[in-house]
Amino acid sequence: MRNKRLFFLMIGLILFIAVIGFSLRDRQLSAPEKFVNDSVAYVQQWLYKPAGYIAGFFEDIGNIRSLQEENEQLRTTAAAYARDKIKYNVIEKQNAQLERDLKFTERQRQLNDYQYLIAQVVSVSSDPYNPTIKIDLGSENGIKENMAVVTVDGLIGIVSKVSAFSSNVEPITSLDEKSPNSKSISVTVLGRENDSFGIIATYDQENGRFEMTRIPENDPMIVGDTVITSGLGRVFPRGLVVGTVETTPQAGDFGLTKVASVKPQADFNRLTEVFVVKMADNEGGTP
Amino acid sequence: MTIGRLGVVMFLLFVIESTLVPWFIPTSLVGRLYPHFTFVFVLYAAMYGTRHKALMLGLLYGLLQDVVFYGSLLGLHTFAMGLIGYVTGLLLEKRKVTMMSALFTIAVCCMVYEIIIYAVYRVFWFTRESLAYAVVDHMLLSTFLQLGFALAVYVPARRWVQSAIPVRQPEKEEE
């Protein structure tokens, strides 16, 4: 009897390791998985959003004092926006004209053409090392793996698994260079897009900062610079805010490149509405 | 209550722990409290029901957690919940479990569960935290959350489990 139990335990252990090894690969979801995902997401969406509204209501009451200040700030921003908008229109027209004159190919023209799909968060995982977020858009809505997910504050995650009507988003706070399916984001600095470069592939859980690596020796990056995606990997679009530089770049692994720490910009908690960024040509890109 | 209804209750708990509970966690404790309410019910099934039903429920709801929040690996929660449910049932099946010993068992099992999860993610290099940091960071706090939940639902959970999963063993002994 005891031997039988031990035998089953061993079989279970072997199966478990085999399943983990099998699931670690970069694989698409199978039909039963998609079905379970979509049906559970359908149930979850009836609970997450109303809870968010109620919590948001109480938060709003708490914030009522700072409203005046915020209002003034927004008015200044709106004035600046109106001024910039006129400038932008002129420059956009000029740019289109120049692109025509220089005979840009269709692919080059569509490079900065993004579409923002609004998605609702339906649930968050309760596993400390797998903080997956589920959203209510899936392959039926044109979502594909490795698309960037942003909030109004900045980049928050990468689409990791796609079902028909829902998909899983891996927050960028779970990035790790050494993990088996590591992803990295190529970044640059706002205002000096052509001079600065770095790779963000690791988030340090213990102090809550990103590690930006592979910064060139003579990079003019300074503390306080806004870090944005560079769009060089062709997976993420250009100009999504990731965070701000917090330490001056120090010599890295072999002294050839530098390393700096980056403070995240977006808030990863209590998300309700997120945007999935769809690029004009998202085919054939790997991160 | 039948086993099917118990399953529905556990499914609702599974939905609640990933949708409602995050909104009730204070901002200062975000990332440190993780609810595992279905797991508490698996333990109740192990203590007041049979080990086979506990194994079945553990595998089923562990698999649900794995599939629904599939990020990088599958099967971890299935294995951990099933194993702990079965072993707890094996050790405590023929004993009379009082409330205090039930809560003590739940506390120990929650720690074991968190440590199995940590260990697997550590082995596969998904995290680089040290065990001491992880214990202080989220394991102890989460265990207290689970204990609070277990205490709150002790009376109905025990009644439901006992009516859903009839235990044959003690009746034989009485005869």
Image (cartoon, rainbow, N blue to C red):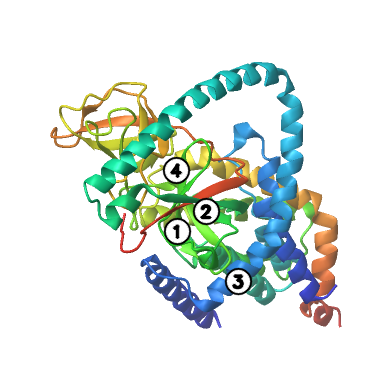
Alpha-carbon span between mark 1 and mark 4 = 14 Å
Q: Residues within 10 Å of mark 4 (few under 14, many from 20)?
A: some
Alpha-carbon span between mark 2 and mark 1 = 9 Å
Residues A89 and B35: in front is A89
* Tag 1 near tag 4, CB within 8 Å: no
Query: Mark 3: which amino acid?
Result: Val
Query: Mark 2: which amino acid?
Result: Thr
Dot placed on the residue nearer the N-terminal end, 2 or 3: 3
- Name the spot of residue B114 as percent of width and height, x first: 54, 52
The residue that label 4 is drawn on is A173
Q: Is residue A180 left or right of residue B33?
A: left
* Tag 2 near tag 3, CB within 8 Å: no
Q: Quadrant of the N terminus of chain B?
A: bottom right
The residue that label 2 is drawn on is A132
Alpha-carbon span between mark 2 and mark 3 = 16 Å
Dot placed on the residue nearer the N-terminal end, 2 or 1: 2
The residue that label 3 is drawn on is A36
Q: How many numbered marks have been drawn onto this rendered protein structure?
A: 4
The residue that label 1 is drawn on is A160
